[in-house]
Amino acid sequence: GAVVSQHPSWVICKSGTSVKIECRSLDFQATTMFWYRQFPKQSLMLMATSNEGSKATYEQGVEKDKFLINHASLTLSTLTVTSAHPEDSSFYICSASLSPYNSPLHFGNGTRLTVT
Amino acid sequence: DAKTTQPTSMDCAEGRAANLPCNHSTISGNEYVYWYRQIHSQGPQYIIHGLKNNETNEMASLIITEDRKSSTLILPHATLRDTAVYYCIVRVPLGETSGSRLTFGEGTQLTVNP
């Protein structure tokens, strides 16, 4: 089946630093990738949608200058949390999809970010 | 977006069938019903999806009512490893060339007991 790899699986960083999370589709080309965030005991919240070669579309309330998304190829998208603060500590999960729109989304195993 | 309603939690005995209901009364004609599950601290796992007809794969069966306002996910022989949060999602199409997002609700915490 389709595999989405996310790296790192966990990261601890100091407040004010930036952290980059990678999301790769290993055995298929992903025209679209999605980034989600999940706080403890809550459901997944969509942060942004990225299409290869174009700017990401951010959900309302998500700061695009803080959460930089780059989708430079059909197999790689990156999320950079800039100037991280403790409130950014969360579980970040990426997913990828083949077109057409009704293809199942496949998810990475998530990245646990802790900002101290 | 068509919203879904699921029970907060359910219990099931190991080896028995687990039937997880979902209401999606405002679903549109071109929207698919998707089921995912999330085991603690992992990414969601795709289970099954359907539009109108019942579907079955190696993991589960999906029963969609004729009016499409509700569906049931069936795990035929639940095991302890099936303990997870199960999400029923109606997928909103964004277009033919771009993938469409999944909007997660709160899901059902299924606990399979020995």
Image: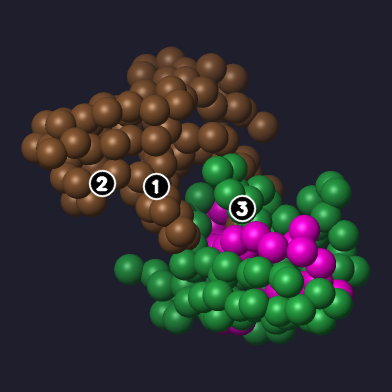
Left or right of A4 on screen, residue A46: right
Mark closest to the chain's N terminus, 1 or 2: 1
| Residue shown at 51% from the left, 23% from the top | B5
**Which residue is more in the foreground, A105 or A14?**
A14
Establish if B50 lies above or below A69: above
The kind of residue on which mark 2 rests is Asp
Tag 1: Cα neighbours inside 10 Å, few (<14), some, or many (≥20)? Answer: many
Residue at the spot of label 3:
A38
Chain of the residue displaying label 2: B
Q: Where's the N terminus of chain B, which quadrant?
A: top right
Colour-to-chain, green: A
Element type where label 2 sits in the image: helix
Q: Which mark is residue B82?
A: 2
Asked if badges 2 and 3 are on one and the same chain, I answer: no
**Is residue B81 a member of the stretch shown in magenta?**
no
Element type where label 3 sits in the image: strand
Badge 1 vs badge 2, beta-carbon distance below 8 Å? yes
Residue at the spot of label 1:
B37
Image coords of residue A100 (percent x, y) = 54, 57
> Which span of residues is magenta-colored?
A75-101
Image coords of residue B61 (percent x, y) = 24, 37
